[in-house]
Amino acid sequence: MSDQQPRGAVIGPSIQIDGTLKGDEDLLIQGKVDGTVELKKNTVTVGESGEVKADIFAHTVIVEGQVEGKIVGSEQVVMRKTAKIRGTLIAPRVTLEDGARFNGTIDMDPEAEAIKSAFSGQSSKSSFSSTASGQASKQDNSSAGQTERG
Amino acid sequence: MFEEHQPGLAAPLFAQVIGDLDAEKRLTVLDLGNVRAGTVAMFSEFRCRLDIADLPDALPLPRDDEDPEVRRQALASVFMVHEPEALDLILCWNLLNYLERDDISYLISLLAPRFKPGTRIHALMEYASPLMPATPGAWVPDKNARLHASQVDEDQVDSPRYKPKELERLMPQVKPERTVLLGNGLQEFLFTPRPVSEVESS
């Protein structure tokens, strides 16, 4: 289970949702979701019992369960050791616990087109648009490295 | 991530590869192994797209003597999730000994469409011991480009100990740029693509 007590909505383990999820609060997914999850200003946590076949767009994405699809975090994506992910992961900061299973792509290039387009038009102090210059990008990535080694 | 008393394995060719990378240019790296925090941390210092194949998770490849395609499909499936962007660097750390000869040839044929001039394959192979861990472990780089072994299986099996000349024959699409014998029974390889005309005439 997540170390952080969720302050937002919870999709319980017996719940299955097909379609698009949107909102303005944090979300913990312990059930099954097929489709798209868009909470671009919030944190989405896929709990240990969560099974998501969806593209996820959020400020922060924490994965403890299973995800198949694209995960885009404008701030960061965290893969816990219980995570099993197949797909594409796009974020300026990626934190990984050894033991996580991953087959796919981790795109940490702040100037990649996929990153710019995912959060275009969103104003956020940590959005990708604010890391457009090479120097800013390098600073962001350096901090990610320090986090990993912490 | 690693304590000072764990010096890790000095891998001069890997250190050379990392030193040659341009931090200002987009970099596409394919790690054939499983995802490790140290690898993500190392390449997060670059404008990097990091593809993870997690080949160990697909091993041993299924065997069906009546349908050899089953084995090929299992190998191909680890790459299906990746968009075919040209690769700057491929990491292949102690995995080739876990593949049969035909698998190695098929693996390189799967990778070849993503080669470009300057693509490099960095590989580690055990050469000294007739035995190797029963399942592939993980190698993790630190910030000094030294490599650390983890998840080492205590059970052992016979090692095929492919020789460099045999690898060249199995992988005609590439040629060795440099090889280095390391002190602990491992050999380090740096391969680069052969020109297409050279491959076709071989």
Image (spheres, coloured by chain):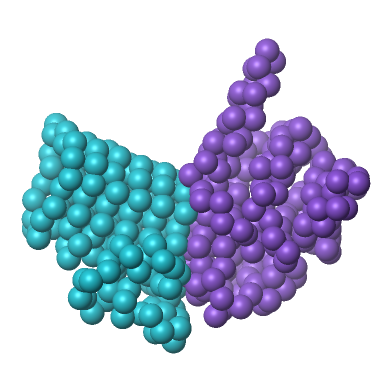
Q: Is residue B37 left or right of residue B193?
A: left
Q: Quadrant of residue B169?
A: top right
**Rendering coords of residue A12 (x, y %):** 12, 39
In this orientation, which residue lies closer to the viewer: A60 or A17?
A17
Give how far across and how far down residue B24 sits, in percent.
Answer: 55, 80
* Count of numbered circles on the image: 0
Task: Kindly indicate the quadrant of the structure image that contains residue A33.
Answer: top left
Position of B168 with respect to A138 (left or right) is right
Q: Quadrant of the C terminus of chain A?
A: bottom left
The answer to whether A49 is drawn above or below residue A42 in the figure is above
Q: Residue at x 24, y 41 (%)?
A: A35
- B84 in relation to B65, above or below: below
Question: Relative to B104, does residue B49 appear above or below in the rendering?
Answer: below
The answer to which image quadrant residue B108 occupies is: top right
Task: Report the residue that reaches farthest toward the top.
Answer: B66
Q: Which tint was used for chain A?
A: cyan
Q: Which chain is purple?
A: B
Instruction: Report whether A41 appears left or right of A81.
Output: left
Q: Is residue A89 left or right of residue B43?
A: left
Please tell me which residue is depicted at 67% across the width and 77% down the height of the picture: B19
The answer, for residue A104, to whether it is visible in the render is yes
| Residue B158 visible to an observer of this rendering | no
Q: Identify which residue is drawn at 48% across, 44% down.
A: B81
| Residue at 61%, 35% in the rendered image | B75
The one of B152 and B34 positioned closer to us in this rendering: B34
- Where does the image place residue A37, in percent across and percent down from the top left? 21, 50
